[in-house]
Structures are given as structure tokens and as C-alpha cells.
Amino acid sequence: MPMKRLRQVLATVCFTFVTLLFLDFTGTIQHWFGWLARVQFLPALLAFNAGVIAFLIVLTLVFGRVYCSVICPLGVFQDIAARFGRRGKKLPYTFSRPKNVLRYGVLAAFVIIAVAFHAAAWLDPYAIYGRAANSLAQPLWMWGNNLLAYFAERMDSYAFYPVEVWMKSLAVFCVSFVMIAAVALLAWRNGRTYCNTVCPVGTVLGFLSRYSLFRITIDTSKCNGCTLCARNCKASCIDAKSHQVDGSRCVACFNCLDKCTRGAIGYRFAYGKKAVGDAAASGEAGKEKMAAGGRRSFLAGAAVMLASAASAQVAKKVEPIKMDGGLADIVDKKEPVRSTPITPPGSQSARNMHANCTACQLCVSVCPNEVLRPSHKLETFMQPYMSYERGYCRPECTECADVCPAGAILKISRADKSSIQIGHAVWVKDRCIPLTDGQECGNCARHCPTGAILMVPSVPGDPKSLKIPAVNTERCIGCGACENLCPARPLSAIYVEGHEVHRTI
């Protein structure tokens, strides 16, 4: 199999299944291909996943920027956009000199911002693509999968949402659209511009790839200066006049290999005697042997990559989330004002969540009860937080912890989750139905999974008086069942206040 075709097959597989991770409502894709999110560079770095980081560094030092052309979903997305853009119009690419000041300046700014403000999400290629898949592709996927049922359910649910809910959703949608559209436009016009001038991951891997063992090299004895290779290089890194290939920008797409009619350009061992200049002496047989060896090396490396990443993940058993039957959705609730935002069990603290989250939206995509949603606050913009107007955090669900690739939400068991206190319930007397309407209720106590809420007489010493909830904050885990199922509206008579640091009870 030619190397370009092999790269295309592997890239298609990775891109397809990474995309499906954000569209998967059954858990099947997560079960088999969840590891693809964990082998993304920045999430692995934030999660301190030394094995994955070491593997990606070694992969780059051996084969070049294979990560950018095969594993990174935004990289493959750029290839798709470029195919329908410049190449679709038959316009050739041209060599451009590396913009090192811009590249390393953006990288330095990214590092400073990430360390000082924990804002690592904005330029991470995986997070940019993930936000687009969640905000743009998931609704289309769901509508297409079950158009009438999904449309009817969503319209019924969202019809009564307050205007601010629509505005927050619209803001997230617009930001996601603008960022992915900007990357697509750059790729449509000039190929891998984002990869080689803006992307911090691309800059880091580009620094390593200039020393890779296998690289694209030009045999000057065979080159006739036709520039076919340079005109088909979407990374604009081939200088046909000087017969040089900028290894820091080459993404190992292999588009140039099958364009050269003289066999002057090839993917070869860069430190061999016959890598540059004297390949003619080896004859055609030597050339074929070297090319075959390169193909075998690339195929072996790709196989090792997939096998290593897959074996590092522990397969999880997919079980359906149990949903309440017979309960009508309360769709017109408003989000209460909380002093402290609620972060998911496993995130340990709001600080850890803020520091490690790339806002890729994978946890938002898989949350079965729509408890997780992107933040609209500037300091945590698009990072997930919890709110209970649409559902509550069920004790048996660990989906967000299972899929998080960046260490923002650590893996936990169901037993662990039931003992993690992410917040505590607060009762608001002025909204409680027994006191405002004179009606029996007790919804919050009936649905509390930890028994942290008891109904007590509203008049002390009078057992016949209407009962009101009493919250035991030491037993409450902050799951939000009471807030979600409270019939008071527009604000619940009982709501959850988040904890800055989670604790085990």
C-alpha cells in the first residue's frame, strides 16, 4: 500500500471515531475508541499521562509529525477543508519561509496564559475540534438519527427556557463556529497555515520533527526542478530551488511522493549515506528497497501507536443509565445564583477543573441528563459546570469521569461517587410549596439518594402541621435530585451550593 494511501486510511479511521465520540449517545464508541481522546497531546500533557507523552515524542522523533496528519482531528479536518478549497480549484501551493517569530511567539504566549490564567483551551487543536463537534455536529447528528422525535422533544423542552438560557447556548455556538470556521478558511485558502503558524502543539512537535529519523528528502541528482512536489505541498515547506524540505513544518502527508515522476523525492532515513545527493549510485533496486523499508517502518510505527494506546486503556462495561419513568420534565426552571459553581465528581476542586480542562466538551456530549453545560463566564468560558434545571447527577453515572482525557475529571467508581460531596443543599423557606401554597410535597426527601433530607413539622411540637424539609449537610453529596425535582418555579425551593474543594463523606 502506498504511504499516502496508508496515511489517509489511518487518518480517516482516527478522525471518524474521534468525531463519533462526541456524537455517541449509546456509549458503544466510547467503550471501544475512548482511548483516541486520551492520546491527544495537550490533554495527555495536562493529565500528566507520561506514557502517552513519551510515546508521542518518540513517534515524532522517529517518523516526523505523524500525529498532526493522522491522530489530531483538527489536522485531518484541515486536510478536508484544503481539498475542497485551493486544491479543488487546481491552484498550486507555493513555498513560504517559516514564520518562526510568530510560531514561537504564539507558543510563548500560550504557555504564559495557560500557566497564569489556566486558559489552555483556546488554541488546543483537539479542544477546538471537540467544541465544534459538540456544538455544531451533535445537533445535526441527533436530528438526522431521529428527526421527528428529537425535534419534538427538544422543542418541547426548550420552548419554555428563559431567554438567558438561549443566549448562553447561542454564545457557545457562535464561539465554536467562529473558531472552526477560521481554521477551515485558513486551510481552504492555504493548507496547513494554522498547523504551522498558530497551533502550539504543532510548534512543539515541529521542533522535534526537524530531528526525526525518517523525513522527506530530495535526491538532487534526479531532481529536474519541475516544482511539482512544492506545488502539491499543503504545508508550503518544500523549497524546490534549493532542494530543501523544512522538517519542522512537514506533516508527513506524503502528497508529494506520487507527484514526482523521477523518484527524486522520498520518505527516507534522514541520517543514512544515501539519504541525499548520491541515491543514483544505488540504482533503481536500491531505491525500491529503501522505499519499501520506509513503508514497512511507517506501517509498523502506526501499528505500535494504535496497539500501545489501546492496550493502555481499561475497557469499561457500558450499562444504560436508568431514567425516571412517569415524571414530567420541569422545563421552565431558572438557574439559581450560586456563590460557588458546581464541578463534577472526580474533578476534586474548582481549581483543578479550571487548571486542567481544555473545554473540549466531550464530557458535555456524553452527559445523559444534560447536567453538564459550557460555562459562559469569562474566566472559565466554555469549561463545563453543573446545573440541575434539566436533570440531576445520578449516583450510578460516571460518564464524564470515564471520558475526560485531560485529568480535569479523574476516573472514579460508582461507589466512590456516592461518597464524594461536591456541594450541599440549601433550603429557601420563602419558595417552599407547603408554606407558600399550603400543600403537602416532600419531593426532595423522596428522591434524595443519600437520605440527607427529612420532612419535619413546619410548626415545632405540632405533628399535624405541614412538613417541610430539613437538610443534613453532612450526608448531602450535592447530586441535585432535590433541586431538579422540586415543583416550585421558576426557582426551586431547594438548591445546591457548590464546594470549592470536594470532600469524602
Image (spheres, grey):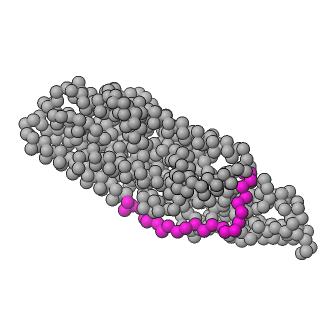
Q: Position of residue 482 (x, y in %)?
A: 73, 63
Can the viewer see residue 460 in this picture? no
Task: Tell which of 223 and 244 is nearer to you.
Answer: 223
Q: Magenta stretch: give its range.
A: 310-335
**Residue 245: x percent and y percent?**
26, 32
- Residue furthest to the front: 148
Q: Nearer the viewer, residue 287 or 157?
A: 157
Screen quadrant of the C terminus: bottom right
Could you tell whether 383 is left or right of 444 in the image? left
Q: In this picture, is 440 found above or below 65?
A: below
Q: Is 330 placed left or right of 84 in the picture?
A: right
Q: Residue at x 21, y 51 (%)?
A: 296
Q: Please say if 344 is above or below 181.
A: below
> Which residue is found at the position 46% from the left and 46% from the top?
126
Quadrant hosting residue 277 = top left
Q: Nearer the viewer, residue 366 or 25?
A: 25
Examine the structure image and report whether residue 314 is included in the region drawn in magenta.
Answer: yes
Viewer-nearest residue: 144 or 269: 144
Residue 100 falls inside the magenta stretch: no
Residue 257 lies in quadrant: top left
**Considering only vertical position in the picture, is 478 above or below 83?**
below
Residue 149 can be seen in this image: yes
Q: Residue at x 52, y 56 (%)?
A: 145
- Count how many numbered circles sit on residues in the image: 0
At 46% across and 36% down in the image, what residue appears? Answer: 183
Query: Is 274 left, or right, of 238 in this rendering?
Result: left
What kind of secondary structure does the magenta stretch mostly adopt?
loop
Residue 129 position, x and y percent, is 48, 44
Q: Quadrant of residue 453?
A: bottom right
Point out residue 205 in the picture as x, y percentages from the top left corner. 36, 41
